[in-house]
């Protein structure tokens, strides 16, 4: 021991502050137990453990972490929201809804952006652990075969052990509280309804970025549409530009075969619509177009876009509730996602059949 509040790393080495892990080891208890005693958690700790922790803290000269105390007591006023892209209309709308819901209960929201990079997501979570927000909400979709999944789970579990809460939105790849909406079934229902309108040949635009929810949307749509028609699936760049460029790359013969384009997001659907028009094809007279998300900017689109509606206000309300409640017996809630048919996909008449 080298004096109160510090420990030596060896002869001549600089002293480092005593950590909560040091106290837990000295007291012979787990780190979460030591945290509950020293950071003022409302969770009860056995008197014998409590005395051992306090005695070890006094002997080592431990100085409590004030941000951790605030979080353990539930008094931190910040929720950290981790999203994929702030420029994406879906995520910007999601962020706005979560901020609105948080403000109703006097909380603030900080936003971190992963740029759809798994390693960046992991780095951001590590940083957020040090900042000790009251809760972390991950609204970005999970990845197919992510390289850092185990490390991410470990970081989030360690954060929860110190009193924080983790909530996922539409992400079933991690073992934490989840507010979900059914990407697969929403797309499948849309496909069936479009098939009932007479559509038979569909180009499905998925995502070149390996995202779980986008794969679920593709699989759901293909399963529903192939009951009555045929689909061709392609994975262009995951953006308005990527969808437009892919549509422009089609040969004239390929374009003429289509009577429908489905894109896994509204943003991509609008890019596809732009590409079709540049090719001289009329929407919906020549080709129907549909998307997924029902983003608010669709109200300015002509023709009105058929899509799958996701109630972002309900998703945000549930996510903020789960991020702030003390209830430990919550079950997964799935917010409905359902088709909304609009002018971009009218029923196909016999005269339009090629």
Image (tube, rainbow, N blue to C red):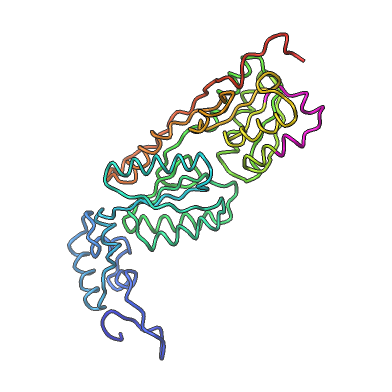
Dominant secondary-structure state across the stretch colored magenta: helix
Q: Is residue 249 on the magenta stretch? A: yes
237 to 260, vertically: above or below:
below
Relative depth, front residue between 44 and 163:
163
Q: Is residue 12 on the magenta stretch? A: no
227 to 16, vertically: above or below:
above
Residue 333: x and y in percent read 40, 34
353 to 103, vertically: above or below:
above
Q: Please identify the residue farthest to the top as the structure is shown.
A: 350
Magenta-colored span: 245-260
The residue drawn where x is 67% and y is 28% is 261
The residue drawn where x is 62% and y is 39% is 240
Relative depth, front residue between 236 and 160:
236
The residue drawn where x is 21% and y is 54% is 42
In the visual, does 145 lie left or right of 279? left
Q: Image quadrant for the N terminus? A: bottom left
Residue 343: x and y in percent read 58, 19
In the visual, does 259 lie left or right of 164? right
């Amino acid at each position: 021991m080298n004096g109160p509040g510090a420990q030596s790393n060896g002869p001549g080495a600089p002293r480092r502050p005593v950590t909560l892990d040091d106290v837990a080891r000295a007291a012979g208890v787990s780190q979460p137990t030591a945290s509950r005693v020293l950071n003022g958690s409302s969770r009860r700790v056995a008197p014998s453990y409590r005395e051992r922790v306090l005695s070890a803290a006094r002997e080592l000269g431990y100085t409590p972490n004030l941000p951790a105390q605030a979080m353990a007591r539930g008094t931190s006023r910040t929720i950290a929201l981790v999203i994929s892209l702030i420029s994406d209309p879906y995520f910007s709308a999601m962020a706005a809804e979560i901020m609105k819901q948080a403000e109703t209960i006097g909380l603030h929201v900080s936003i971190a952006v992963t740029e759809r990079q798994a390693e960046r997501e992991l780095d951001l979570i590590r940083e957020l652990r040090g900042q000790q927000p009251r809760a972390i909400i991950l609204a970005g979709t999970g990845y197919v075969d992510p390289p850092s999944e185990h490390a991410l789970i470990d970081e989030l579990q360690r954060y929860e052990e110190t009193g924080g809460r983790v909530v996922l939105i539409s992400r079933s790849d991690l073992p934490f509280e989840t507010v979900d909406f059914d990407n697969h079934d929403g797309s499948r229902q849309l496909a069936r309804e479009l098939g009932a309108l007479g559509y038979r040949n569909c180009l499905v635009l998925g995502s070149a970025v390996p995202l779980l929810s986008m794969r679920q949307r593709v699989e759901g749509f293909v399963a529903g549409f192939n009951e009555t028609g045929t689909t061709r699936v392609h994975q262009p760049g995951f953006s308005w530009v990527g969808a437009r460029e892919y549509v422009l790359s089609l040969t004239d013969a390929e374009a003429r075969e289509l009577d429908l384009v489905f894109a896994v997001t509204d943003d991509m659907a609008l890019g596809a619509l732009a590409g079709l028009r540049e090719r001289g094809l009329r929407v919906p007279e020549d080709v129907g177009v549909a998307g997924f998300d029902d983003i608010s900017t669709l109200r300015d689109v002509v023709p009105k876009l058929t899509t799958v509606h996701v109630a972002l206000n309900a998703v945000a309300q549930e996510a903020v509730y789960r991020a702030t409640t003390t209830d430990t017996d919550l079950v997964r809630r799935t917010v409905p996602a359902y088709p909304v048919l609009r002018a971009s996909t009218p029923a196909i008449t016999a005269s339009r059949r090629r």
